[in-house]
Image: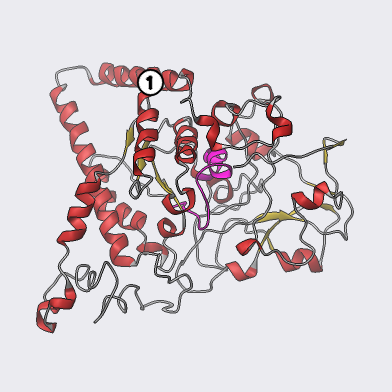
Amino acid sequence: ATGGHSSAAGHGNLFNETYTAFLERDLKDIFGSIGIEFIGRNYAMGGTSSSGEIAMCWEQIFGVDVDFFTWDYGMTDGNHAEKMLHYGYRGGSSPGFPAFLGITTGSRARKGREAKVNELEAMGMAGFFPNEESWIAVRDAIPNSSNLTQSEAEAMPEYVKNLKCSGIEKGSPFCDREKYTTYACPQRKKQTSWHPGFKEHARRGHSLALFLVQALLAALKDLNENQNKDIDELLLQFQKEEEELKANFSKADLPKDYKKAFKVDEKFVRDFDVSLFFKGRSLCHTGRLPSQTRYLGYLTNTQKVGGPGVVGNETYDVGVNDKEVIANPTNGSMRLAWEARDRERCPAVIKPDYKDFFMTTDKVGWAKLSFPNDAEKTAYNYVPSQFKGVIVLVFRSCDWGKCEKGFLDEEDYQKKRWEMKVNSEPVIEIGDIGA
């Protein structure tokens, strides 16, 4: 499972040109040759950091069956390595006890990020981060296309040709022009200077595939060296070792600076233990895409299931256009909604990551949202006694902080412009957790 911001999500490219897509195509037959189905889930989301909603909703977004997950939130997490710690811990606490890879650990924040991966590993989780020198060596070894004659350039491999001129995917004569493919919907949105093109995605995907092939070969070598042992006993031994590691991970003390991942409102600090956001069970009712809870019909409690698809041809429950909510409000309920301007029309899948939300208007009076529903209770093994009753409300974000007229947020709540109840009890006060 890939977690990350817009670059990891592949903005500007087709969805099948992201590094996760290249990775999956590289490994599907290799893993399939020994009976393992390899599935690559690119659930990165533009303009999103790893902590807060993504970390606490980890199982609902990425799934309960993940074996390996990545962190690629360098731009949105910035120098706050504690966010990576929160994300990594929540992912490692999921049922599959997956291994973790921090992809973009470079820049000035590299030391702090690597320290967090090491802390997770010391607690019992399998953690990895790239060898920066190797990544740089690969990048530097790419031939400069601007110094080649046309015949020399044409003789180069397709994905190396015009990859580097004045820089990676930068410069003349053709690196700028050939950064993105043009065979489908060439005027795609998000084709910015900071989003990598398909060749750079391919380079990253192939590199990650080599890493996982190396891990697979190492595992096969270990099995071969133990071939004289009874296979069932060996499996039980490995399962026992993993259960012990998982137990140690959940019981281990959190690193001393874990509280830096949040900045809880001072009026709640005395009565609130931030470790709950790391170790406590959570159940999210989030409209975000991509996510397993949406694709598998859990959020909407329906049999409509699917995956990333062409806009207008999705098979999962997409909800309703926000303009429809305003034009035809439904009494008594908040509705799953999406913004029309988010959806980019194309015969191919472009970017299936959307910040969908639940919405109502002032025309309907009190509107209700009930969760968990029956599907969520079953899918996530809901046991009320395992929860502390802390409710985190995530408000819909507005582009560049500019919300439309009539939008109500937490500031408006403090000014008593809207009210909220939980199980019929009025909510007296809300506070910021700084996630």
Residue 52 magenta:
yes
- Identity of the residue drawn at 58% across and 56% down: 316
Q: Which residue is mark 1?
A: 245
- Colouring scheme applied when the structure was drawn: secondary structure
Q: Position of residue 309 (x, y in %)?
A: 50, 62
Q: Position of residue 254 (x, y in %)?
A: 48, 24
Residue 32 magenta:
no
Helix, strand, or loop for circle 1?
helix
Report the predominant secondary structure element of the magenta stretch: loop
- The quarter holding residue 381 reads top right
Quadrant location, the C terminus: top right
- Identity of the residue drawn at 67% across and 47% down: 394
84 displayed left or right of 396: left
- Identity of the residue drawn at 44% across and 54% down: 75
User: Is residue 198 at least partly visible in the picture?
Assistant: yes
Magenta segment: 42-61
Question: Can you say whether 167 is above or below 294 in the image?
Answer: below
Q: Nearer the viewer, residue 93 or 261?
A: 261
Q: Nearer the viewer, residue 55 or 227?
A: 55
Q: Position of residue 130 (x, y in %)?
A: 28, 44
424 displayed left or right of 115: right
User: Is residue 68 at least partly visible in the picture?
Assistant: no
